[in-house]
Image (cartoon, helix red, strand yellow):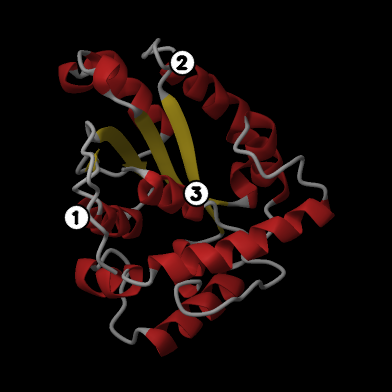
């Protein structure tokens, strides 16, 4: 969907995105092109998350020397039961990244989806909320459902991912509605906080927070 031009143009937001896999990179590329009027999204060619960001900001001049002009760092990944024990290490890296920009602090945003990115992609077509997306069989069912909507989809394929992502506003609506239901399961709140994100990573209920990134980009003047 085309974006409406703003009468007042402010400086573009500078965002560095770290992607778990090539599918996340393909989706990020769509966001990069679609929101190029309000944001500069950039991501490393190699996939990698928290440890990769830590190394780049410590050792790569392109990241280290430009920390003051970077507004946000995004981590785009799947939430899996096998990663529950990684939270404290990840949180330590998140806190160190926040300190790289003082006024205002660098914002770290977690674009998380339960089990596989294909669940987030399915939300571009319809509201679905399976009880679990953790086992290989559960992930295969989501993939099969997605292929019914976009038969040419393949992981990391930019063209098919862009066709899906064109429905990002519908996906955000569907994801937001499902996300609110987690309050009944004990989620500490809707606001993006470390406490909430820890709860999400620990419990692995079905959800996606990618809609929060979409909302942010949509809100930029």
Relative to 185, 114 lies left or right:
left
Q: Residue at x 43, y 17 (%)?
A: 105
Q: Residue at x 60, y 73 (%)?
A: 138
Q: Which mark is residue 212?
A: 3
Q: In which quarter of the image is the N terminus?
A: bottom left
Q: Is label 2 in contact with label 3 (beta carbons under 8 Å)?
A: no
Q: In this view, does 136 lie above or below 211?
A: below
Q: Is residue 117 above or below residue 123?
A: above
SS at mark 1 in the image: helix
Residue 213 point in image, percent of width and height: 43, 47
Residue 218: tell me if it is visible. Answer: yes
Q: Residue at x 70, y 57 (%)?
A: 180
Residue 101 point in image, percent of width and height: 36, 14
Q: In this view, does 159 lie above or below 36?
A: below
Q: Residue 42 is drawn in which quadrant?
A: top left
Question: Disc 2 and disc 1: Cα gap in Å?
Answer: 29 Å
Extreme-front residue of the structure: 7
Q: Is label 1 in contact with label 3 (beta carbons under 8 Å)?
A: no
Q: Name the residue under label 1.
A: 33
Task: Sort mark 3 into few (<14), some (14-19) or many (20+) by Cα contacts within 10 Å.
Answer: some
SS at mark 3 in the image: helix
Q: Name the residue under label 2.
A: 96
Q: Earlier in the sequence, mark 2 or mark 3?
A: 2
Q: Which of marks 1 and 3 is nearer the N terminus?
A: 1
Q: Residue at x 20, y 19 (%)?
A: 60
Residue 118: tell me if it is visible. Answer: no
Question: Disc 2 and disc 3: Cα gap in Å?
Answer: 22 Å
């Amino acid at each position: 969907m085309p974006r409406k031009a703003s009468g007042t143009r402010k400086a573009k937001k500078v965002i560095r995105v770290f992607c778990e896999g090539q599918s996340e990179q393909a989706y990020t590329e769509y966001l990069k092109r679609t929101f190029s009027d309000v944001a500069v999204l950039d991501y490393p060619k190699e996939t990698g998350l928290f440890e990769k960001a830590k190394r780049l900001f410590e050792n790569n001049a392109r990241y280290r020397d430009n920390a003051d002009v970077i507004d946000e760092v995004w981590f785009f990944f799947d939430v899996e039961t096998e990663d529950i024990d990684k939270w404290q290490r990840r949180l330590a890296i998140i806190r160190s990244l926040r300190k790289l920009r003082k006024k205002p602090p660098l914002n770290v945003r977690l674009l998380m989806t339960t089990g596989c990115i294909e669940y987030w992609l399915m939300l571009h077509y319809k509201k679905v909320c399976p009880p679990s997306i953790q086992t290989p069989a559960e992930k295969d069912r989501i993939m099969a459902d997605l292929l019914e909507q976009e038969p040419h989809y393949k992981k990391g394929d930019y063209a098919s991912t862009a066709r899906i992502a064109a429905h990002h506003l519908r996906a955000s609506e569907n994801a937001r509605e499902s996300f609110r239901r987690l309050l009944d399961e004990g989620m500490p709140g809707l606001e993006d906080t470390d406490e909430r994100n820890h709860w999400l990573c620990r419990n692995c209920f079905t959800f996606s927070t990618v809609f929060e990134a979409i909302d942010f980009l949509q809100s930029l003047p």
